[in-house]
């Protein structure tokens, strides 16, 4: 494998990692918001 190929691969991997990281943060926020809403809708419900 050429060095250039390895470099391109790591760049792609970094991009996908950043995308997954940002997506994960969004999912986490949505989940937290959902739980907060759920608590308001169903009082005393333990998540």
Image (cartoon, grey):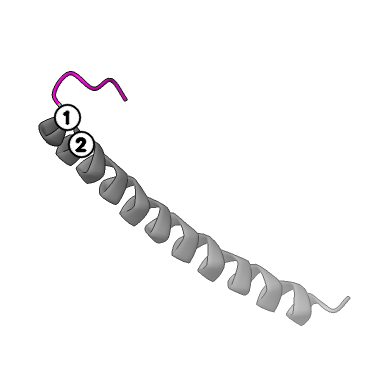
Rendered location of residue 45, percent (x, y) = 23, 22
Residue 46 belongs to magenta span:
yes
Q: Does 18 appear above or below 31?
A: below
Label at residue 38: 2
Looking at the image, residue 25 lies above or below residue 43: below
Name the residue: 41% across, 52% down: 24
Where's residue 20, x and y in %? 48, 60
Gap in Å between the C-alphas at discs 2 and 1? Answer: 6 Å
Q: Nearer the viewer, residue 36 or 18?
A: 36
Q: In the image, which is nearer the foreground, mark 2 or mark 1?
A: 1
How crowded pointer 1 is (Cα within 10 Å; few <14, some 14-19, many 20+) is rated as few
Q: Which residues are magenta?
A: 43-47
| Residue depicted at x 24% and y 37% | 35
Mark 2–mark 1 CB contact (< 8 Å) = yes
Image point 79% across, 76% down: which residue?
3
Q: Is residue 34 above or below residue 19?
A: above
Q: Position of residue 29 (x, y in %)?
A: 27, 48
The residue indicated by pointer 1 is 42
In the displayed structure, 47 sits above or below 32; it is above
Is disc 1 placed on a helix, strand or loop? loop
Residue 41, position as x, y percentages in the image: 13, 35
Q: Quadrant of the C terminus?
A: top left
| Left or right, residue 28 beside residue 44 | right
Q: Foreground: 3 or 10?
A: 10
Q: Nearer the viewer, residue 41 or 32?
A: 41
The N terminus lies in quadrant: bottom right
């Amino acid at each position: 494998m050429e060095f250039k190929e390895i470099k391109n691969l790591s760049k792609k991997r970094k991009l996908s990692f950043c995308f997954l990281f940002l997506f994960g943060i969004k999912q986490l926020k949505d989940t937290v918001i959902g739980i907060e809403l759920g608590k308001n809708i169903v009082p005393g419900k333990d998540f």
